[in-house]
C-alpha cells in the first residue's frame, strides 16, 4: 500500500496484501530507574522491537483517543509487513519505506526523528513518527468532519487516498472507487488490529470481581501513562506536579491521554467497587484484607513504597503466573510485567484483595 496524494488516488490501484495477520500501570516519575524486563508488552505483540519503540513514541505524542499502538502497527503491516529494504518496500507507484510515503507526502510529514542527520522514509524512526503525525492529524480531521462512521476508518481512508477523496464521498470511498483499494485497505487494517493488541498477551480466565477487573484493565494494555490522568470513565489527559508528569524536560502529562497506576485500578474495579483515586488511599481502603505472596489471585492489588514503608507510590493488578498488569511511569504504557521486576523489590509492601 501507499499514501496517495490528490488525483493520483483516483487512478492508481495497488495490489492488496491478502495473506494478513495484523496488529502497557504506574510508579511515580522519580522511580524512572526501575529496570524494564517485560516481554515486550506495550499493547503490541508480534511487532519487531525496532518498530515497537517508535510506534509507542508516535502514539504517545498524539492526544487523539482513537490513536492506539495497534492501529499504527496494523497499518504498518498492511503497508509493508515491516519491511525496510528498498527492494521489498518500494511500490510500483514509487511509494517508499515501511510506511509507504510518496515523495510529495513525505515532504510534508517527514522529520529527522531518529537524529541521524537525515529525514528519510527508509529510517524506521523517521517513517513511523511521520506516519503517526499524519494519522494524528487525520484523526482530528475525521473527528471534526461530521462524516458518519468510525473516525479511524475515515483517517485510514485519508492516509491511503488523500483527505480530498474522503470529502468527495462524504466518508470512506466505496468499493467502486479505485477497484476497492481504499475500501479494502480500511477494512483489512481495522479487522486485523487485534492480532497486535496487548490483551492477547494476557489470558484471563475465571469469574468474580477480581477476574472481571483484570479482564477490564487488560483491554487498556498499550494505553499511554499520563500522570494524574484517567478515572472511572477511561483515559484522559493528566497534569504535571513537582517532578511528576515530565518527559525530556517538558510536561508530557497535559498532552497525553492515558492512565496512571491508581486510575487504571480505579477504572478496572468501577462501578462494582468504587475504590478511591490514589494508590495510597487504595491501600488504606483494602489493607484490612491482606494477601500473602503465595496466595495471590488474579485481580489482587500489589503495592510499593520507598524502602517498603511510608507513602505508597505504586499499585498494580496481579495478572497470574507471577506477572502484574500496571501503568509504570511517564513515557511508558499499560503493560504486563513480572512481579519480581515491575518495581524495586525492596519497595514491595504487600498485596490486598479488594
Image: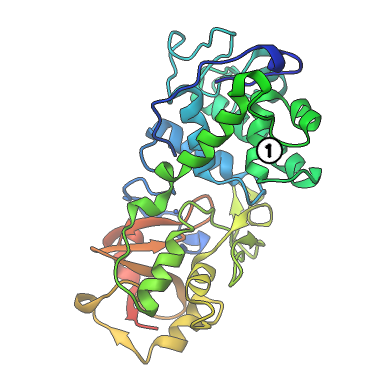
**How many numbered marks, from 0 up?**
1
Q: Please identify the residue farthest to the bottom as the structure is shown.
A: 288
Q: Answer with the quarter of the image where residue 241 lies.
A: bottom right
Seen from the viewer's position, the closer of residues 20 and 231 is: 20
Seen from the viewer's position, the closer of residues 279 and 347 is: 279
Residue 238 is at least partly visible in this image: yes
Few, some or many residues within 10 Å of mark 1 (<14, 14–19, 20+): many
Q: Position of residue 110 (x, y in %)?
A: 65, 23
Seen from the viewer's position, the closer of residues 155 and 12 is: 12
In the image, residue 73 sits, relative to residue 275, either above or below, namely: above
* 106 left or right of 263 in image: right
Q: Could you tell me which residue is drawn at 44 percent across and 45 percent down?
A: 194
Image quadrant holding the N terminus, namely: top right
The residue pinned by badge 1 equals 154
Q: Position of residue 123 (x, y in %)?
A: 51, 20
Q: Please identify the residue farthest to the left as the structure is shown.
A: 294
Label 1 SS:
helix
* 348 left or right of 110 in image: left
Q: Could you tell me which residue is drawn at 55 percent across and 62 percent down?
A: 259
Q: Please identify the residue farthest to the front as the structure is shown.
A: 176
Q: Position of residue 187 (x, y in %)?
A: 55, 36
Amino acid at each position: 500500500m501507499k499514501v496517495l496524494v490528490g488525483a493520483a488516488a483516483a487512478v492508481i490501484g495497488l495490489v492488496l496484501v491478502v495473506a494478513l495477520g495484523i496488529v502497557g500501570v504506574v510508579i511515580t516519575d522519580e522511580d524512572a530507574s526501575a529496570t524494564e524486563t517485560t516481554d515486550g508488552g506495550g499493547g503490541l505483540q508480534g511487532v519487531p522491537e525496532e518498530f515497537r519503540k517508535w510506534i509507542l513514541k508516535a502514539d504517545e505524542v498524539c492526544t487523539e483517543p482513537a490513536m492506539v499502538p495497534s492501529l499504527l502497527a496494523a497499518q504498518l503491516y498492511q503497508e509493508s509487513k515491516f519491511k525496510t529494504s528498498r527492494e521489498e518496500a518500494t511500490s510500483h507507484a514509487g511509494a517508499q519505506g515501511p510506511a509507504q510515503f510518496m515523495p510529495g507526502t513525505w515532504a510534508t510529514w517527514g522529520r529527522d526523528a531518529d537524529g541521524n542527520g537525515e529525514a528519510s522514509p527508509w529510517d524506521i524512526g523517521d517513517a513511523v513518527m511521520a506516519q503517526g503525525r499524519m494519522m494524528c492529524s487525520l484523526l482530528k480531521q475525521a473527528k471534526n468532519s461530521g462524516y458518519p462512521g468510525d473516525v479511524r476508518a475515515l483517517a485510514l481512508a485519508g492516509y491511503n487516498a488523500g483527505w480530498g477523496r474522503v470529502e468527495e464521498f462524504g466518508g470512506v470511498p466505496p468499493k467502486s472507487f479505485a477497484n476497492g483499494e481504499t475500501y479494502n485497505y480500511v477494512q483489512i487494517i481495522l479487522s486485523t488490529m487485534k492480532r497486535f493488541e496487548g490483551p492477547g498477551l494476557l489470558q484471563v480466565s475465571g469469574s468474580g470481581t477480581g477476574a472481571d477487573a483484570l479482564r477490564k484493565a487488560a483491554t487498556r494494555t498499550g494505553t499511554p501513562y499520563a500522570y494524574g490522568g484517567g478515572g472511572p470513565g477511561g483515559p484522559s489527559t493528566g497534569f504535571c506536579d513537582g517532578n511528576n508528569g515530565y518527559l525530556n524536560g517538558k510536561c508530557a502529562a497535559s498532552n497525553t491521554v492515558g492512565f496512571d497506576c491508581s486510575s487504571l485500578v480505579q477504572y478496572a474495579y468501577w462501578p462494582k467497587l468504587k475504590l478511591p483515586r490514589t494508590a495510597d488511599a487504595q491501600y488504606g481502603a483494602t489493607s484490612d484484607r491482606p494477601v500473602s505472596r503465595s496466595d495471590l489471585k488474579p485481580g489482587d492489588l500489589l503495592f510499593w513504597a520507598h524502602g517498603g514503608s511510608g507513602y505508597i507510590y505504586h499499585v498494580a493488578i496481579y495478572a497470574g503466573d507471577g506477572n502484574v498488569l500496571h501503568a509504570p511511569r511517564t513515557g511508558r504504557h499499560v503493560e504486563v510485567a513480572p512481579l519480581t521486576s515491575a518495581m524495586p523489590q525492596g519497595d514491595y509492601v504487600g498485596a490486598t484483595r479488594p
